[in-house]
Amino acid sequence: MHHSVEMSVPSAATDGTLSRLAAIDGVLALKVERGAGVRPEGDVITVQTLNRSVDDVLAAAAEAERHGPIAVATGGVESLVATGAQGAIDDDADESPWEEFERRLRHHGRLSLNYVLLMTVGGAIAVAGLLSPPVPQALALAASAVLTPAFEPVGELAVALVRRSGYAIRRGLVSVLVGYLLLAVGGGLAFLVLRALGLASPKTLASSEGLHLVIDPTAADWLVAAGGAVAGLLIITSFRQAVLAGALIALALVPAGGVLGMGVAALDVGLALQGLQRLAEDVALVLVLGGLVVLGKDRLKHHGRRPLA
C-alpha cells in the first residue's frame, strides 16, 4: 500500500511547499494546479509517494498552513509504478500515518446508531454463547468478537492518551463508557430471555467453559489477552484492519461485558463484579500495552510528528 496525498494550500505557500516535496526521496510524482482551489482558496498539489515518506509529505502540508487555511486528503494506492524506483516501491513500509489510523478509530468508535446497536447485539450474542454447549459457544464468542466494535473505542483512548489530547480523551472515554454499558445491557437482556425459556440455569452457568475462562483466567489466558492488546494496535497502525477481529477474539472484552450484564440481570453481585474486573483488566491491557505500541511507532516511525488534526 502506497499513498496519494492531495492538498489545497494558499497560493503564497505553493512554491515553498513544492520545493520541500521535491526534496523528499519517496515522492515519485508531483503535480500542481494553480488557482484550482475554491474552498480553501489557493492551489491544489497532488503527490504520489512511498508510504515511508508520507509523514514528510504531511509535515510539508503543515508548514503551508502558516500561510492560511489548508485541506489535505490522503488515500492508499494499491499499485504505484515509477521509472527507476521499482526496488524502493517493492521495499516500501507498511505504516499508517497518524491522520488515518486516528480517523479509523474515531469512525468505528463514534457514538452512532450503528455503534450502539452493534455493541448491544454483540453483548447478547456473547451471553447466548456462554450459555451454549462447547461448539456453538466457540462459534458465538468468535462471532460476537468479529461484529462488535469493542476494540476501537479503547484503542482510540490509548492513542488519545499518547497524544495527550484532552478533546480526544473525552471522546474516547464517552465512547468506552456508553459502548460497554450497552454491551452489558445486551448481555443482561439475553440472559433474561434465555432464563425465561429455561435455558439459563445455575447448572448451565457452572458447566460453561467460556464463563470460567472469563472469570477465572489462567496465566496462559493472560498471555493470549496481552498478545491481543499488542496485536490490536499493531494491526490498526499498519494497514491490516481486516484482521482486527483476531485481536478482539484473543481479548475477553466482549464476553466480560456480557458477564457483567448477566450478573446484574441475575442479581448475582459476585458474578457482576467478576465480569467488571475482567473487563477492567483487559481494557487496562489495551491502554498500557497498546499505548506502548503507539508510543514506539510515534518515536521510531513518525519521529514525533504531530498529526494535522
Image (cartoon, rainbow, N blue to C red):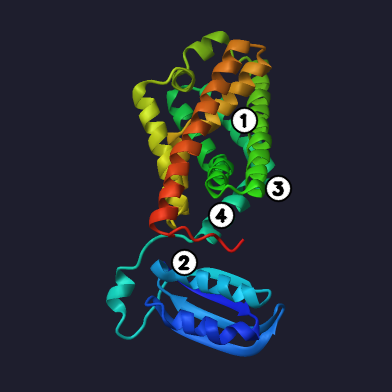
Q: Which residue is tagged 4?
A: 102
Q: CA distance from mark 1 to mark 4?
A: 29 Å
Where does label 2 land, which residue?
A: 55
Answer few, some or many: residues within 10 Å of disc 2's Cα (few below 14, many 20 plus, some between 14 and 19).
many
Callout 3: SS: loop
Q: CA distance from mark 3 to mark 4?
A: 17 Å
Residue that appears at 65% across and 46% down: 166
Give the secondary structure at mark 4.
helix
Callout 2: SS: helix
Nearer-the-camera pick, 289 or 76: 289
- Residue type indicated by callout 2: Asp
Gap in angstroms between the C-alphas marked 2 and 1: 42 Å
- Residue labelled with disc 3: 112
x and y percentages locating residue 169 in the rendered image: 63, 44
For the residue carrying disc 4, how many other residues have a C-alpha within 10 Å: few (<14), some (14-19), or many (20+)? many
Q: Closer to the N terminus: mark 1 or mark 4?
A: 4
Left or right of residue 131: residue 246: left
Image coordinates for residue 140, horizontal then vertical, percent = 51, 32
The numbered dot on residue 124 is 1
Please report whichever mark, 2 or 1, sits nearer to the chain's N-terminal start.
Answer: 2
First in residue order: circle 2 vs circle 3: 2
Between label 1 and label 4, give the one nearer the viewer: 4
Tell me if label 3 and label 4 are in contact, CB under 8 Å.
Answer: no
As drawn, the residue found furthest toward the front would be 66
